[in-house]
Amino acid sequence: MTTKKTTLKKKAAPKKAAAEVLPNPPAEIVIAPVTTVELRLTDGTLDYSDIWAFVQKHAGGQEGNVRIVPLENVDLTSAEPVPFGYAGKSGGVRQRIQDWMLFGYEGDASLKLVLGKAAKLGHSRKKPNCLLALMNGGYTPSSKYWGTPFVKLVVETQPKA
């Protein structure tokens, strides 16, 4: 038997397509500033119509575009983060609703979600007294904290193209 030497041919590697650079890309990335609009008590008192006028004017009527944001005077490390609304039953309706407004429901502080969850406990979506209390500083004008807001409503808007 004779031995025969053969040379294996290497297959040519497929050619890679060169990255094509378009002279005029179809899109560009633009970093646009975000504008925030807030509803916060500065003088007098707020009422339900102020809340809904704010939602209509600045959030396009969409409660989901509005966040409830606690102010600096809220002690988020305390079992009673604000000085009212915690005197009743521990874990009661008012306490739960206020906590959702201060901490968010599972971390989400959108007005739509919080009011939706609170409505299941009997809290009015259109006349949210717990929200109004946190915005005015108590449930009645006789509250010693009346006029001191504890939350604000915030809408972040993107500039229109």
Image: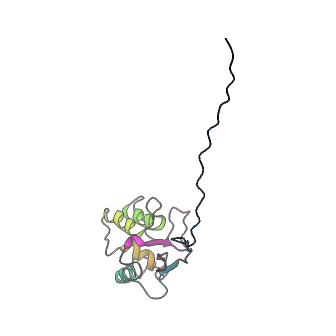
- Relative image position of residue 142 (x, y in whole percent): 42, 81
In the picture, measured across the screen, residue 56 lies left or right of residue 5, that is: left
Question: Residue 51 occupies which quadrant of the picture?
Answer: bottom left
Which residue sits at x=40%, y=82%?
54
Q: Which residues are magenta?
A: 60-87
Identify which residue, 98 or 103, lies in the foreground: 103
- 65 within the magenta span: yes
User: What's the coloring here?
Assistant: rainbow
Dominant SS in magenta:
loop
Question: Residue 139 occupies which quadrant of the picture?
Answer: bottom left
Which residue sits at x=58%, y=62%?
20
- Relative image position of residue 138 (x, y in whole percent): 43, 76
- Relative image position of residue 10 (x, y in whole percent): 64, 36
Res 86 seen here: no
- 161 within the magenta span: no
As drawn, 111 above or below 2 = below
Identify which residue, 19 or 132, lies in the foreground: 19
Quadrant location of the N terminus in the rendered image: top right
Which residue sits at x=37%, y=68%?
112
- Relative image position of residue 126 (x, y in whole percent): 31, 75
As drawn, 2 above or below 12 = above
Residue extending farthest to the bottom is 43
